[in-house]
Amino acid sequence: MTYLHVTATLGDYDAWKAEFDRLHEERAKHGGRNYQLFQSSDDPNRIAVLIEFDDEVSARSWNDYLQLDEGKAAPDMTDVEVTYLDMVEHVRLPTA
């Protein structure tokens, strides 16, 4: 599994989220399996998204798709950082 990790500051979370949700089907066509969305507890317009893909080729393909068509990229995003991550270990800790 490869994960696409994106952090960004948004101008308008609600507008960005509507666009993000609109692209669920297309994201799946590019190999997206699931995602986790986080908001900063200090600033709800500062977000992090972790999207799971089968492999790095699929993750990069999705990011390229967004970059090639500005109409598909979420509006008003700054401080964008994109990282491709491979899972090395996943451990469930025992409950206390």
Image (tube, rainbow, N blue to C red):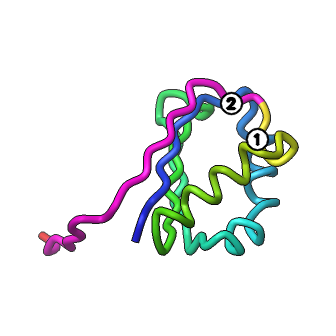
* The furthest residue to the right: 71
Q: Tell me: residue 27, above or below residue 94.
A: above
Q: How many marks?
A: 2
| Along the line of sight, the residue nearer the viewer: 31 or 17 | 31
Q: In which quarter of the image is the C terminus?
A: bottom left
Please report the bounds of the magenta region as a residue range.
76-95
In reply to whether residue 11 is colored magenta, the answer given is: no
Are the residues tagged 2 and 1 within 8 Å (C-beta)? yes
Q: Residue at x 50, y 34 (%)?
A: 81
Three-letter amino acid code at disc 2?
Met
Residue 23, how many percent across, how many down?
77, 61
Residue 20, how many percent across, how many down?
73, 53
Judged from the image, the secondary structure of the residue bearing numbered disc 2 is strand
Tell me where residue 27 sits by quadrant.
Answer: bottom right
Residue 85 lies left or right of residue 49; in this view the side is left
Q: Which mark, by number, is residue 77?
A: 2
Judged from the image, the secondary structure of the residue bearing numbered disc 1 is loop
Q: How crowded is mark 1: few (under 14 residues within 10 Å), some or many (20 or more)?
A: some
In reply to whether residue 89 is colored magenta, the answer given is: yes
Q: Tell me: residue 62, above or below residue 25.
A: above
Q: Which residue is drawn at 48% across and 74% down?
A: 54
Q: In which quarter of the image is the N terminus?
A: bottom left
Residue 68 lies left or right of residue 96; in this view the side is right
Residue 3, how many percent across, how many down?
44, 60
Q: Tell me: residue 55, above or below residue 63.
A: below
Tag 1 residue: 74
Q: Which residue is drawn at 50% across and 41% down?
A: 82
Three-letter amino acid code at disc 1?
Ala
